[in-house]
Amino acid sequence: MNPEEGADDREQKVVGSYRGFSILDLFLRILAIVGTLGSAVAMGTTDETLPFSTRAFIFQAQYDDIPAFRFFVISNGTVCGYLSLSLPMAIYHVIRKGAARSRALLISLDAIMLAVLTAGASTAAAIVYLAHKGNASANWLAICQQYQSFCNRVTGSLIGSFGAVLILILLIPMSGLVLSKQAM
Amino acid sequence: MNPEEGADDREQKVVGSYRGFSILDLFLRILAIVGTLGSAVAMGTTDETLPFSTRAFIFQAQYDDIPAFRFFVISNGTVCGYLSLSLPMAIYHVIRKGAARSRALLISLDAIMLAVLTAGASTAAAIVYLAHKGNASANWLAICQQYQSFCNRVTGSLIGSFGAVLILILLIPMSGLVLSKQAM
């Protein structure tokens, strides 16, 4: 075996591991799209009217009564849109082995979107926590005792969003690893 | 001029631009350490006793009455510690031109810490917003009218934390760019 062949073999192997990562990247992106879309829709369609409402007094809880929930829907929608637009790029990375510059671009955009999504999810989580537990020192009551179905719905809608946060945390190191392999 | 020399020149130039980024990276890390440390200390030392407190009734607001603020201090402390530990690595990147693997490692850790810090800062911001504005639908009153100095202090302590978030969002693309230049 001459040294040329050995180098070729090594390159083949490296390219193979790129492709594995790129395919996983594409798959995780689709999963995160589903997660953020589900969260945005679940939160955005949440409202509850209590059964003892009369025509004069309506006891109603809606997601957009609380600014943090509105921000949650916006940030999930934004990240969902970004991830959908990043799919062609992810497919391009599966096909092309190099593409170092576009991989670096994707890392940058992923980092920004990670921050946007984490901010949205944490803000909503802070309010959901307060709605469940209340806070005695600030005299904020737990509203979940009255609006149970509302509370369950908004709590559930956090899941998809935090799932997508975890996926984005995974995507960035994966792209970094591929880049570092190319650099060596 | 022979082609060898041209390649050498190009390499020199690329190495030069690495070093610029690496030095900027080091500088930004120190800035972020200051920001997160300042935020953690400012929040952690916040408490206010109202002047009309009597011996029997004490009207006091402390940062650890509110779990979100405790989480804020913990996340800022964690990221501050991580950034301090990452300084030797950042210095190593200034000295060594290659170091692709450790750059990729730093991208991964930076991404995780970005998520931790954003979560802490957003959670605290959600509660600070509530303390200032209150929420009529949930019947949560704005406590800032009573605890003004407490509120100003916790609001101010968000600044360093969000500054550090912005710096981390910058650091990840910078490392990505250096890696992609090495890969090409």
Image (tube, coloured by chain):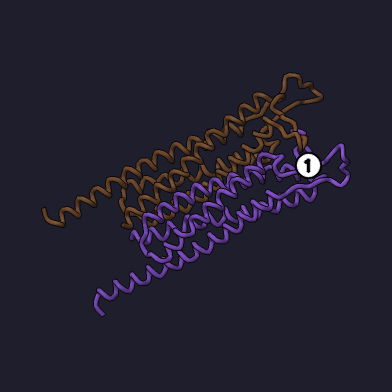
Chain colours: A purple, B brown
Answer whether residue A169 is visible to the viewer in this image: no
Answer whether residue B105 is visible to the viewer in this image: yes
- Name the image quarter holding residue B170: top left
Amino acid type indicated by mark 1 = Ala
The spot of residue A138 in percent (x, y) is 74, 33
The spot of residue B174 in percent (x, y) is 39, 47
- Name the image quarter holding residue B157: top right
- B136 left or right, relative to B169: right
- The residue identified by callout 1 is A142
- A46 left or right, relative to A9: right
Looking at this rendering, what residue extends furthest in the bottom direction?
A: A1
Q: Is residue A53 above or below residue A110?
A: above
Residue at 55% x, 45% y is: A116
Rate crowding at label 1 as few (under 14), some (14 to 19) or many (20 or more) other CA atoms within 10 Å: many
Residue at 54% x, 33% y is: B159
Looking at this rendering, what residue extends furthest in the top direction?
A: B51
Residue at 60% x, 45% y is: A74
Looking at this rendering, what residue extends furthest in the left direction?
A: B1
Count how many numbered circles sit on residues in the image.
Answer: 1
- B177 left or right, relative to A64: left
Quarter occupied by the C terminus of chain A: bottom left
Q: Is residue B83 above or below residue A91?
A: above
Quarter occupied by the N terminus of chain A: bottom left
